[in-house]
């Protein structure tokens, strides 16, 4: 990957790559999920709850990796081996593999696919009866013969094993290859030599078994994962107007009859209720929308917009912003770490930061909460049903009571009692014939 980030931690649609096969295994009702990581501890604290981490002390191949998890494998059960860089495997494929394996009473069952270009993959060599004889690796010149390289059926790296038979066979592996590594497929001849059945499980869709070895592969897999996500939402009742320009991460939740307009990006743990209209050109990052929320041309990060509220166009909601029911953050409005009460309107050209605004208020254009004094942040409290004049600046800490008013152009530095009108500006004075005087001075 040419990256400081371990390959399996590169993200695909908002999830680290390794989380995709983990999620599929959990959905397939695996009794236990174990991930094998390296000695650098890169996967420590990066796995979902309930997943065990085993450490492979040295990178010595897939067989040695499975052996590193030996103490966490139940010898009396079935063990399915997945690859952390094969992220598109589904729960249905895992469950079907395990069921076929147990129905055949096989010692091992290998998931295989046929590829038009199998370059780089281990080739599946069949015996005269059609069973699996062995897998020939092709990582280095000399690993496989010309006839073996012509085989199009390949090992996907996904297996189901009788756990006891697998663990016994692993003890007999030898690193007889150009890399001096212990390859997991080399247990298959060992099992066959013990007169145990080695079966194959052909997978019809080769996309499920696509591996990631570089960033080109990563982009191809991400596109397939994204299409899968969008199709699932559309089949559940969400309208994606233009899937080609829409990005929705794996953990995003969308309610029925919500419409996502073109060029919108829904990232992280974002969610939207029913009958929302998102976009066009809207980004949500870890943000939650209630029902019937509209958000055109806006950018929302770690905020909450409750049912019936509207945002934008061209609004920016920053972390900690909460718009309660039917509130409005209008054109060119920025809100940060503030609660905007139900039905309250911040229509346009305003910045509200570190503030609490009651219900039913209306803050005029150009309203600013001056929340930072150069060293500390301070909060502004604005009550219910307040009418704020245009170009009002509230210099925090300050409190405005319910039903209060502010005059246009005011700089409010003192508390305003409930029901009062705050006028905080210089009295207007007109200088007669000022223009003529300036003209004379310029001659």
Image (spheres, helix red, strand yellow):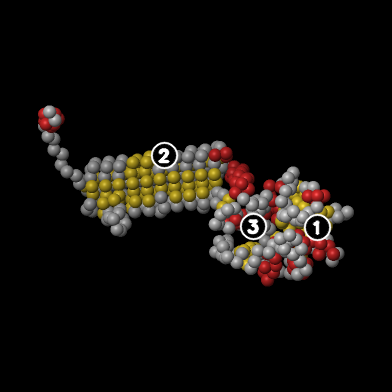
Percent across and percent down for residue 130 are: 85, 53
Q: Quadrant of residue 19?
A: bottom right
- Residue located farthest toward the bottom when viewing the structure as drawn: 71
Indicate which label's residue lies in the foreground, 1 or 2: 1
Evaluate if marks 1 and 3 touch, with contact meaning CB atoms under 8 Å apart.
no
Tell me: 378 left or right of 50. Answer: left
Query: Closer to the N terminus: mark 3 or mark 2?
Result: 3
In what element is the residue under mark 1?
strand
Real-space Cα distance between discs 3 and 2?
A: 41 Å
In what element is the residue under mark 2?
loop
For mark 3, what is the residue?
84
x 44%, y 42%: residue: 298
For mark 1, what is the residue?
134
x 48%, y 40%: residue: 281
Query: Closer to the N terminus: mark 1 or mark 3?
Result: 3
In what element is the residue under mark 3?
loop
For mark 2, what is the residue?
313
Percent across and percent down for residue 197 are: 83, 61
Residue toward you, 191 or 402 = 191
Query: Closer to the N terminus: mark 1 or mark 2?
Result: 1
Position of residue 141 relative to residue 292, above or below, is: below
Q: Quadrant of residue 169?
A: bottom right
Percent across and percent down for residue 414 are: 22, 53
The C terminus appears in which quarter of the rendering?
top left
Tell me: 19 left or right of 428. Answer: right
Real-space Cα distance between discs 1 and 3?
A: 23 Å
Residue 290 seen in the figure: no
x 50%, y 42%: residue: 264
x 61%, y 46%: residue: 216
């Amino acid at each position: 990957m040419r990256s400081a980030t371990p390959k399996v931690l590169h993200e695909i649609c908002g999830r680290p790559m390794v989380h995709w096969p983990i999620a599929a295994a959990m959905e397939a009702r695996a009794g236990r999920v174990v991930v094998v990581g390296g000695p650098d501890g890169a996967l420590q604290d990066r796995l979902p709850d309930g997943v065990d981490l085993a450490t492979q002390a040295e990178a010595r191949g897939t067989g040695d990796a499975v052996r590193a998890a030996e103490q966490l494998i139940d010898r009396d059960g079935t063990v399915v081996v997945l690859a952390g860089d094969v992220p598109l495997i589904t729960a249905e494929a895992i469950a079907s593999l395990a069921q076929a394996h147990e129905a055949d009473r096989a010692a091992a069952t290998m998931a295989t696919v046929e590829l038009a270009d199998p370059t780089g993959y281990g080739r599946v060599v069949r015996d005269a009866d059609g069973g699996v004889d062995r897998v020939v690796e092709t990582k280095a010149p000399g690993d496989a013969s010309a006839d073996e390289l012509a085989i199009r059926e390949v090992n996907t790296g996904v297996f189901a094993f009788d756990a006891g038979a697998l663990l016994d066979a692993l003890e007999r592996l030898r690193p007889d290859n150009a890399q001096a590594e212990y390859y997991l497929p080399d247990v298959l001849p060992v099992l066959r030599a013990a007169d145990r059945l080695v079966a194959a499980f052909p997978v019809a869709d080769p996309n499920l078994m696509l591996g990631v070895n570089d960033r080109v592969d990563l982009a191809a897999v991400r596109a397939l994962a994204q299409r899968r996500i969008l199709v699932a939402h559309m089949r559940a009742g969400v309208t994606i107007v233009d899937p080609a320009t829409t990005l929705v991460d794996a953990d995003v939740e969308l309610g029925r009859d919500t419409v996502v307009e073109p060029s919108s990006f829904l990232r992280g743990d974002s969610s939207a209720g029913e009958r929302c209209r998102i976009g066009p050109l809207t980004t949500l990052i870890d943000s939650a929308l209630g029902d019937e929320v509209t958000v055109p041309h806006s950018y929302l990060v770690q905020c909450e917009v409750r049912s019936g509220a509207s945002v934008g166009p061209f609004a920016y909601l920053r972390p900690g912003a909460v718009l309660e029911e039917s509130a409005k953050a209008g054109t060119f409005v920025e809100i940060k770490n503030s609660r905007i009460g139900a039905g309250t309107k911040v229509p346009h050209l305003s910045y509200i930061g570190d503030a609490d605004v009651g219900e039913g208020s209306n803050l005029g254009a150009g309203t600013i909460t001056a929340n930072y004094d150069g060293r500390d942040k301070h909060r502004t409290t604005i009550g219910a049903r307040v009418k704020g004049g245009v170009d009002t600046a509230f210099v925090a800490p300050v409190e405005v009571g319910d039903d209060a008013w502010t005059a246009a152009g005011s700089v409010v530095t003192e508390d305003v009692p409930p029901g009062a009108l705050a006028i905080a500006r210089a009295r207007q004075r007109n200088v007669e014939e000022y223009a003529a005087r300036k003209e004379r001075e310029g001659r």
